[in-house]
Amino acid sequence: MYLINLFCSLLAVVIAAGPLARLGLPRWAVAVAGAALVALAQQALIHRALRVSLLSPDGMPIWVEAVLLWGTAFLLAAGGLSVAWWALRLCQVAVPGWIPLAVGAAAAGWLVWMGERLPPVREHEVTLPGLPAEAEGLRVAVLADVHIDAWRGRAWCERLVERVNGARPDLIVFTGDQADGAVDLRRADLAPLAGLKAPAGKFLITGNHEHYFETAAYLQEYGRLGMTVLDGRAAKVRGLWLVGLGDRRSLTRQGEAEAELRGLMAGLPEGAFTVLLAHKPGIARAADALGVRLQLSGHTHGGQVPGVAAVIARFNDGFVRGWYALPRGMRLFVSPGVGVWMGFPYRVYGSQIAVLTLRGA
């Protein structure tokens, strides 16, 4: 995060020395505005000074957080445009200074809105050879990376539940990173999740963010809300065997995750049609080799924005968003996610409530 702040500080200087200085303002006004832009770039330092977590802005006024989030997005958007503005000037092409500033301001608002909006429902139909007859036509809502926090609170969660129920899923699965912040601060925000309706059940695994706070307390709260926690467990649903691979910190090492999955698969009946819930998609090739038929993951947020997507792909074995076919026949779905974490809440690639309809060959 500090590297992002440093990068944004450099962009603030580029903006101030370029388009901002060509607006015809007095030098003192340009200097003050430039200093304000550099200050906006210090999101991590401001959070640290106020003793507020970057993962959840509890304790900080929402309007302050909104200014900081928009400011970082503005620096990224207007800074990139200012670099192009300088390049055009070197090519003797005159562009008014207000253009990169105005476009950057609008783009920043759009990036924040895309990250924080209530996502639409997206229908997916997937054909899975050998699908048990009981699972034919099963509608599975995949809720990845919801990230309920001080920003997306109870009202947002109520609207999410209403939208998911409106899609009429048979089964609901959460693939990790459901919430951020202390459990006591999130209890009221999460309460609407108890209203989710799915006749085949509601299942959940932990993501890495569950382990940044009070893991055991969160799992207890999810159980109280009617979720079945599948970390390290399996459950049979409509002829399918759901297997949950929790994202404990120890499982950040791929070998340990594969060993746990191998043990879980060994405990299933022979010929079981297995659906794996794994927060991070990088285990997909090992899951395919072990006979998993469908893997549902999140964690990547669909890459969020160009450039960042390439970095995310490198750390997740190339899997970023959407559908992938593995060599031995497994299908992988990497959800772009429902929400975002507050450290980088911007999107070009949109969020979604994914509803999968399962079909046999």
Image (cartoon, grey):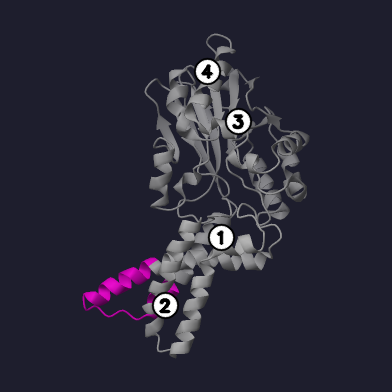
Q: Is residue 359 visible?
A: no
Q: Which mark is residue 262?
A: 4
Looking at the rendered structure, the secondary structure element under dot 3 is loop
> Depth check: 171 or 94 in front?
94
Q: CA distance from mark 4 to mark 2?
A: 56 Å
Residue ID for mark 3 = 246
Q: Which mark is residue 351?
A: none
Q: Nearer the viewer, mark 4 or mark 1?
A: 1
Going 52% across and 57% down the picture, which residue do you hit? Answer: 114
- Establish if 204 lies above or below 306: above
First in sequence: mark 4 vs mark 1 = 1
Q: Position of residue 272 (x, y in %)?
A: 55, 14
Looking at the rendered structure, the secondary structure element under dot 4 is helix
First in sequence: mark 4 vs mark 2 = 2
- Establish if 329 lies above or below 305: above
**76 left or right of 83 in image:** right
Looking at the rendered structure, the secondary structure element under dot 2 is helix
On whether residue 81 falls in the magenta region, the answer is yes
Q: CA distance from mark 2 to mark 3?
A: 47 Å
Cβ–Cβ below 8 Å for labels 4 and 3? Answer: no
Going 67% across and 52% down the picture, which residue do you hit? Answer: 149
Quadrant where the C terminus sits is top left
**111 left or right of 89 in image:** right
Q: CA distance from mark 4 to mark 3?
A: 14 Å
Return the residue found at the far left.
Answer: 91
First in sequence: mark 1 vs mark 3 = 1
Residue ID for mark 2 = 16
On whether residue 128 falls in the magenta region, the answer is no
Q: Nearer the viewer, mark 1 or mark 2?
A: 1
The residue range painted magenta reads 80-103
